[in-house]
Image: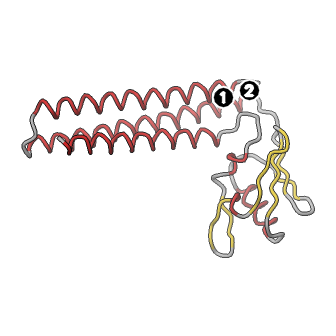
Amino acid sequence: MEELELYLSDADDRMKKAVKHVEAELAKLRAGKAHPSMLEGIKVDYYGSMMPINQVANVNTPDPKCIVIIPWEKNMLSIIEKAIKDSNLGLNPIKEADLIRLSLPPLTEERRKVFVKQAHNEAENGKVAIRSIRKETNEELRKLMKDGISEDAVKKAETDVQHLTDRYTKSVDDLLVLKEKDLMTV
């Protein structure tokens, strides 16, 4: 019976991580408001190591339409500027004396719909991951039945896994609804 609890606990942890991943991916989609997390996926070459921008510079949002990046070393200005231009975020960095300013243009209705579509894709990827975890866990539980654990105990554990799946799938749906509302708010 302890083995069943371990499998359930593992499935719970993995599904939680899948939801956290979806949450992080949705945070990267901009909703017309500047946020430092928008730059999380961008890495820069820092003395031979690829580092996230926030590990080589201060990233601030002085107002809702602007991100200011102040590198800790002045020679990183051009490297950060190039990385932002090369990313597909559609941002145009403006290099000033010792900082980079990113002004976020207002989102058009068309661009908002593109972001909503991306949000739906991220949510669906999260739900697929959760269902995959359910499938793997159920397969492991069935193997335990062959090893002598009662069929009733395994069936109850499978039901518990389904409840976890339903709960975490609903969490992803809730995140998507919030993000969609955020994206479509002008």
Find residue 133 and report its horizontal and vertical position in percent.
33, 41
Q: Is residue 133 left or right of residue 70?
A: left
With respect to residue 10, does 46 lie above or below? below
Q: Residue at x 17, y 30 (%)?
A: 155
At numbered mark 2, what does the secondary structure look like: helix, strand or loop? helix
Q: Quadrant of the C terminus?
A: top right
With respect to residue 132, does 47 lie above or below? below
Task: Please say which color scheme the image uses.
Answer: secondary structure
Q: Which mark is residue 11?
A: none
Q: Is residue 162 left or right of residue 176?
A: left
Mark 2 Cα-neighbour bin, 10 Å: few <14, some 14–19, many ≥20 = few
Q: Quadrant of the N terminus?
A: top left
With respect to residue 6, does 181 lie above or below? above
Find residue 19 and report its horizontal and vertical position in percent.
48, 38
Q: Residue at x 72, y 64 (%)?
A: 56
| Circles 2 and 1 in contact, beta carbons < 8 Å | yes
Report the residue that reaches farthest toward the front.
Answer: 2
The residue singled out by tag 2 in the image is 109
Report the residue that reaches farthest toward the bottom.
Answer: 47
The amino acid beneath tag 1 is Lys
Find residue 33 and report its horizontal and vertical position in percent.
76, 36
The residue singled out by tag 1 in the image is 113
Find residue 95 and report its horizontal and vertical position in percent.
87, 58
Q: Residue at x 72, y 24 (%)?
A: 185
